[in-house]
Image: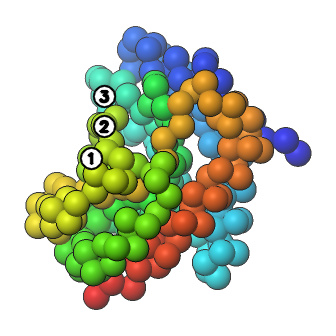
Amino acid sequence: MSINGFVNNDFETFHIDGLEARMEAIQTRIQPKFKEIGQELVDYLSSQLGNEVYLHIAKHARRTINPPNDTWLAISHNKRGYKKHPHFQVGLFDDHLFIWFACIYELDNKHDIAKSFLANFNKLKKLPTDFVISLDHMKKDSISLTELKEEHLERFRDVKKAEFLVGRHLLPNDPTVTNGDALIETIKATYDQLVPFYKMALSAK
C-alpha cells in the first residue's frame, strides 16, 4: 500500500482563519496521513529499539481561541503521553515539514539528559550536515548543526523552559515531501541517526 505524502493544501491549512475551521482542516487533511505514517514509524522504531513505542497525534485540546500554527505526530515509549519523555516527531508548519528527536521543556530528568548530551557533544556534531537544531518547539526558527555550541546545551540544562530538538526540515516543494514512500524512507534514515541519542536520553542518570 502506497502512503500519501503532503501537498500544498496541507501546508495551506495554517492560513485558514479561526480555530474551528483550521482544526477541521487539520483533522480531515493532515491527521489521516499522520495515522498512516505514524503506524509505519511505530513498527519501524519498535523493531529498531527492541521495545514497544506508541503513536500520539496532537489534539490541540487546550486551545480555545487561537488556532495552532503547526501540528505533529509524536512517538514515545510511554503509552499515556510523550511530552515528559524523549520522543520523535514529524509535523508541519506552513512553510516546512519537521522531523525531530525532541526533548521539550516538560521533560523529566532534563538536567541529566543535558549533561549526557554535553558529554557526547562531539558525537552530536558528527550528525549529517543538513541536520538542524531547534531550541523552542513553538517557533519555526532553527539553527544549522554547524552553529550548535556547548552553550546551547548548557542553557537546555540550566533554564527550565529551554528545549533541544535535532533533526531535519524539508520544504513543501521538496519531491520527498509529496511522495509518501520516499518521505517514510527519509524519516527512517533521519531517526536511524538519532536513535543513539534517544537511547542516551532514556538511560541518562
Indicate the quadrant where residue 123 lies: bottom left
Dots 1 and 2: beta carbons under 8 Å? yes
Q: CA distance from mark 1 to mark 3?
A: 22 Å
User: Seen from this angle, which residue lies furthest right?
Assistant: 1
Query: Which quarter of the figure is the C terminus placed in?
Result: bottom left
Q: Give the number of the mark in front: 2 or 3.
A: 2
Q: Give the number of the mark in front: 1 or 3.
A: 1
Q: Which mark is residue 104?
A: none
Residue type, numbered disc 1: Asp
Percent x, y of residue 30: 60, 32
Secondary structure beneath label 2: loop
| Res 79 seen here | no
Residue type, numbered disc 3: Thr
Going from N to C along the chain, the mark reached first, 1 or 2, is 1
Give the residue at x 66% y 75%: 48
Dots 2 and 3: beta carbons under 8 Å? no
Q: Is residue 2 above or below residue 148?
A: above
Give the residue at x 36% y 54%: 145
Q: CA distance from mark 1 to mark 2?
A: 8 Å
Percent x, y of residue 113: 29, 75
Q: Residue at label 1?
A: 136
| Res 25 seen here | yes
Circle 3 packing at 10 Å, graded few (<14), some (14-19), many (20+), is few
Give the residue at x 11% y 67%: 158
Q: Residue at label 2?
A: 141
Q: CA distance from mark 2 to mark 3?
A: 25 Å
Q: Residue at label 3?
A: 64
Please indicate whether residue 13 sits to the left or right of residue 60 in the image: right
Residue type, numbered disc 2: Asp
Percent x, y of residue 69: 38, 28
